[in-house]
Image: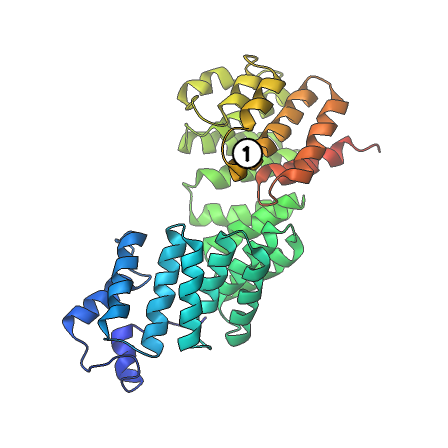
Amino acid sequence: MRRRVRPALAGMLIGGAWFATSPVSAQVQQLIDSCGKDASALSPSQRIDSCTALIQSGGVFGQGLSWAYENRCSAYAANGQADLAIADCNRAIEFDPTGPAYVARGNAFYARGDADQAIGDYNRAISLNSKDAAAYVNRGKAFYAKGDNDRAIADYSQAIQLDRTAHPYNSRGDAYLSKGDYEHAIADYDRVVELDKNNPRVFLKRGVANLYLGAVQKAAADLSRSSELDPHDPYTAIWLDILGKRSRGTGQLAKAATSIDMNKWPAPIVRLYLGQITAADANAAATNGDTATKKAQTCEANFYGGKFASQRGKKDEARRLFELAAAECPKSFLEYGAANSELRTLRPK
């Protein structure tokens, strides 16, 4: 994985190609430090301001300007301004066509919802540096968003060989879970838990994987741990209710609901499971919000509505709702893979 050289040192190492003056002034060095990706104490807006001041200062040029534009690109992307991010990464690439800005631009394309353009940039980044773990991780994420789990798994596996941190294991586990390979998903989540024992989301996902694998006690332990770590999470509460009704015939959602914010989604799903509203009411509530929000909420309403129908022996209705979830859910959603798992169970043997 290519190592970044600190800008102040890079100027000296490459004979002043980064900086208009040598040594670098204290003011320019301060802007470099606050523009860089490692300036974690600063907000994206503060980094944008610092990078803008650095670009306008006249204190950097060539690869230095490429570096500044790339970092402002990343800050814009973190600030939800994907179009501005892409424009800045374009400038970074103009100043240094062989530089690392392709990954940052790929991230901006991905944030804008253009997975194919993102993959093109990650391909270019990998062609320039085959050991860039971030490019493999992010390309895997883009493939995963497209539902191409096998390519996502291959990219995550390559990233793990290059950089064995928790993130590629977590992401590869998600891809295995989405395709119904629960044993491999659990193995990857096990690794994440070893590295981060206080991550409620990974316990939730491992719990769901264990549930579909038929390891009910392990699923109960994982979901309970997830709830302990985040007692306010409504999705863990719903899955615990699903598990309780499957194994004991009763759930504990009424108690858990006291810790859940019942003024926002997925509160209608919770109310459905508590018998307070109908499935039609829950579906109607899912259509509130912007287009992306409606899509996400409708996906969840269909999936959890399918589970609710299944609990009541309404197999045809359950199948219909699971088919809708499998067809319409974003492929990166837990409910997408779960809907396909449910459909496999419902198919005639």
Which quadrant of the rendered structure holds the N terminus?
A: bottom left
Amino acid type assigned to the residue bearing label 1 in the image: Lys
Label 1 belongs to which residue? 294
Residue 331, picture quadrant:
top right
Q: Is 44 left, or right, of 219 in this rendering?
A: left
SS at mark 1 in the image: helix
Q: Position of residue 112 (x, y in %)?
A: 50, 52
Quick one: label 1, few (<14), some, or many (20+) residues within 10 Å?
some
Look at the picture and state if 216 lies above or below 100: above
Which residue lies most toward the bottom here?
15
Q: Is 74 left, or right, of 218 in this rendering?
A: left
Q: 12 or 296, which is in the foreground?
A: 296
Q: 16 or 130, which is in the foreground?
A: 16
Q: Position of residue 293 (x, y in %)?
A: 51, 36
The reply to whether residue 347 is visible in this rendering is yes
The reply to whether residue 251 is visible in this rendering is no
- Residue drawn at x 75%, y 36% is 344
Q: Position of residue 70 (x, y in %)?
A: 38, 66
Look at the picture and state if 62 lies above or below 83: below
- Color theme of the render: rainbow
Residue 337, picture quadrant:
top right
Which residue lies most toward the right here?
349
Which quadrant of the rendered structure holds the C terminus?
A: top right
Report the label total. 1
Q: 42 or 13, which is in the foreground?
A: 42
Q: Position of residue 22 (x, y in %)?
A: 19, 82
- Residue drawn at x 45%, y 37% is 200
- Residue drawn at x 57%, y 65% is 120
Q: 238 or 27, which is in the foreground?
A: 27
Which residue lies most toward the top here?
276
